[in-house]
Image (cartoon, coloured by chain):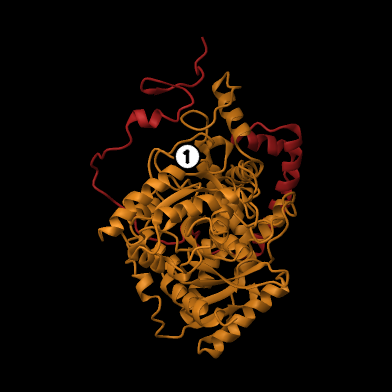
């Protein structure tokens, strides 16, 4: 399954990254290298093997659904690139 | 140089008045300053550390001190401490100030440890050489032409170069054990879920573990017993009893059965490393430990499995850096999409972008089953190998790295080659088991060699007892 430049451009779009021309080129090569290497896993027979998503398999963790104090909005806004009163400011989403 | 060999000795000297904590902190601050070229620290908290020193000195005088009183600790720059920067060595978080404190760090502070600063690392803990940092590469103190290992390179260097007593690092695929081996200090990766990840910037959430670097096994044990345990704020942290590691350390009542996996000593392993480990194993054998050969047949699949799963988790975890709520926002953000794309493209470094791309690819429609699910199945086979091995042995001994510390720039242009260097460490994270790197020897050139010991989940005590035995009975005679 070779990765093409077009694939790389598509993946970049999904990942919200804009890549320079030379980045697309080197990433195409590198991703092919790495994905070529991981093809190795196809040697393994995993027919009846359950996927393992967590190394310490435990039970679900429940807690009472009671509100607890969290970070104040003023604190949460401290690191915002742009904020106003209680809100994060971002570029306009809806066109005029 | 400090005149104590571990924290217990330091605390005695602080109590007797032989050592002033303020002087000690000033000493470390001046050492940090003198060793600036190593680039081990992203942020140094001089005033904060001296303030803490005064408070803790008072508590020691009144006998109201905690068990880590006066231990000077550096923390990896992916762990949050409220009102201090957490940059994760990334441009995207360069001006971020933490709004809460991570549980592991809070537990250190509650026991009166002194936090002296935040250490450099690979960006978002992604790397094996500490060359992927927006704050610049970290240099190995033993040979400045060489890397200190990564991703917790700064934490390893801070301890190795005597810039603090102990440090915290994180280990997702070897990021504590490999730099510990490259710098000649102890580095302990606990069982997954042993230490709360609350306040640790997520890289790969089902792999990330927090653990200490130290000069002595005693200090590693003390730190581990403080930072371990269930935390309501991390639902994956487990409610498993935390032994009194430091007290039980010396009591090696039983000589363990140790497995040597042949897959870890084959082609590609540096001869000097191999010989150094075989020497220690021979001495363990003559001291009464039972040594047996074991097999971990799926080891050759660990790197492939690891890089599929961790990049997938990373691509998801790093989606939060969008330029909207915190972190860097590009000036070129006329539309919302521009804001996302440009903030991320300008904010992330090369390696981080590469991993986000790989992770996005393996999770994307049409490839999920072929890569991600396949790797999750391989992960179970790898864990099964360990489950089976630990039915028969208490511990496993292996190298921490196939090579000695390499030269800066030597591997940075070939990501796959860099990834293959993690051949002996990612398995522990895939299986969620603990591991320690013990500094056992130096190469002919004088470069440090680390030996890795692995144990079953929650068997850190066996690791620590055996490391203590090696430290006191085997290495002291060298």
Query: From the viewer's perspective, is B93 left or right of B301?
Result: left
SS label for mark 1: loop
Q: Residue at x 50, y 17 (%)?
A: A92
Q: Label 1 lies in what chain?
A: B
Q: Using the image as rendered, state which of residue B349 and residue B3 is in the foreground.
A: B3
- In the figure, what tint was chain A given? red
Give the residue drawn at x 25%, y 58%.
B62
From what the image shows, is residue B434 above or below residue A2?
A: below
Q: Residue furthest front?
A: B18
In terms of depth relative to the viewer, which is nearer, B101 or B28?
Answer: B28
Indicate the quadrant where residue B478 lies.
bottom right
Could you tell me which residue is drawn at 44 percent across and 64 percent down? B191
Would residue B369 be seen by someone viewing this image from the given angle? no
A27 in relation to B166, above or below: above
Looking at this view, is A52 or B137 the one in front?
Answer: B137
For residue B77, say whether it is visible.
yes
Q: Is residue B425 above or below residue B367?
A: below
Which chain's colour is orange?
Answer: B
Q: Is residue B210 above or below residue A73?
A: below
* Residue indicated by mark 1: B85
Where residue B299 sits: x, y (%)?
Answer: 61, 68
Instruction: Please give left or right for residue B318 compared with residue A74 in the image.
Output: right
**In the image, B141: left or right of B218?**
right
The crowd level at tag 1 (other Cα within 10 Å; few <14, some 14-19, many 20+) is many
Number of dots carrying numbers: 1
Residue B221: x percent and y percent? 42, 67
**In front of the other: B373 or B56:** B56
Indicate the position of residue B27 as horizontal and vertical percent values.
49, 54
């Amino acid at each position: 399954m070779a990765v093409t430049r077009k694939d790389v451009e598509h993946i970049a779009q999904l990942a919200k990254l804009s890549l320079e021309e030379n980045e697309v080129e080197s990433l195409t090569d590198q991703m092919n290298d790495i994905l070529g290497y991981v093809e190795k896993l196809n040697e393994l027979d995993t027919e009846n093997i359950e996927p393992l998503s967590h190394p310490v398999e435990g039970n679900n963790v429940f807690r009472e659904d009671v509100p607890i104090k969290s970070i104040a909005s003023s604190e949460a806004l401290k690191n915002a690139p742009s904020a106003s009163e209680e809100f994060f400011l971002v570029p306009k989403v809806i066109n005029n | 140089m400090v005149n104590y060999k571990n924290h217990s000795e330091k605390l005695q000297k602080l109590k007797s008045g032989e050592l002033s904590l303020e002087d000690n902190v000033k000493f470390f601050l001046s050492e940090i300053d003198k060793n600036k070229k190593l680039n081990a620290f992203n942020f140094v908290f001089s005033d904060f550390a001296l303030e803490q020193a005064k408070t803790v000195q008072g508590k020691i005088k009144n006998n109201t001190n905690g068990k880590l009183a006066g231990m000077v600790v550096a923390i990896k720059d992916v762990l949050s401490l409220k009102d201090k920067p957490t940059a994760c060595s990334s441009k995207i978080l360069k001006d971020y100030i933490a709004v809460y404190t991570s549980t592991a760090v809070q537990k250190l502070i509650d026991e009166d440890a002194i936090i002296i600063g935040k250490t450099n690392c690979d960006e978002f803990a992604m790397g094996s050489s500490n060359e992927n940092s927006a704050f610049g590469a970290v240099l190995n103190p033993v040979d400045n032409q060489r890397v200190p290992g990564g991703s917790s390179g700064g934490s390893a260097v801070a301890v190795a170069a005597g810039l603090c007593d102990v440090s915290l690092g994180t280990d997702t695929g070897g990021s504590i054990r490999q730099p510990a081996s490259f710098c000649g200090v102890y580095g302990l990766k606990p069982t997954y879920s042993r230490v709360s990840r609350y306040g640790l910037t997520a890289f790969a959430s089902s792999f990330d573990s927090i653990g200490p670097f130290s000069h002595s096994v005693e200090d590693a044990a003390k730190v581990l017993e403080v930072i371990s345990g269930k935390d309501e704020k991390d639902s994956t942290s487990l409610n498993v009893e935390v032994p009194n590691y430091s007290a039980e350390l010396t009591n090696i009542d039983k000589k363990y059965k140790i497995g040597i996996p042949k897959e870890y000593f084959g082609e590609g392993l540096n001869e000097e490393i191999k010989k150094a480990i075989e020497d220690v194993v021979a001495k363990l054998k003559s001291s009464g430990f039972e040594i047996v050969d074991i097999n971990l047949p799926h080891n050759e699949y660990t790197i492939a499995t690891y890089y599929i799963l961790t990049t997938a988790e990373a691509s998801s975890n790093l989606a939060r850096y969008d330029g909207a709520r915190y972190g860097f926002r590009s000036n070129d953000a006329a539309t919302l999409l521009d804001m996302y794309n440009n903030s991320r493209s300008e904010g992330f470094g090369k390696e981080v972008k590469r991993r986000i791309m790989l992770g996005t690819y393996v999770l994307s429609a049409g490839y999920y089953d072929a890569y991600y699910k396949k790797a999750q199945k391989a992960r179970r086979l790898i864990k099964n190998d360990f489950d089976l091995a630990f039915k028969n042995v208490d511990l496993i001994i292996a190298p921490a790295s196939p090579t000695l510390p390499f030269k800066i720039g030597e591997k940075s242009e070939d990501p796959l080659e860099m990834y293959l260097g993690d051949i002996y460490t990612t398995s522990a994270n895939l299986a969620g088991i603990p591991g320690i790197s013990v500094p056992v020897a130096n190469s002919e050139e004088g470069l440090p060699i680390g030996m890795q010991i692995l144990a079953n989940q929650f068997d850190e005590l066996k690791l620590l007892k055996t490391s203590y035995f090696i430290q006191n009975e085997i290495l002291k005679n060298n």
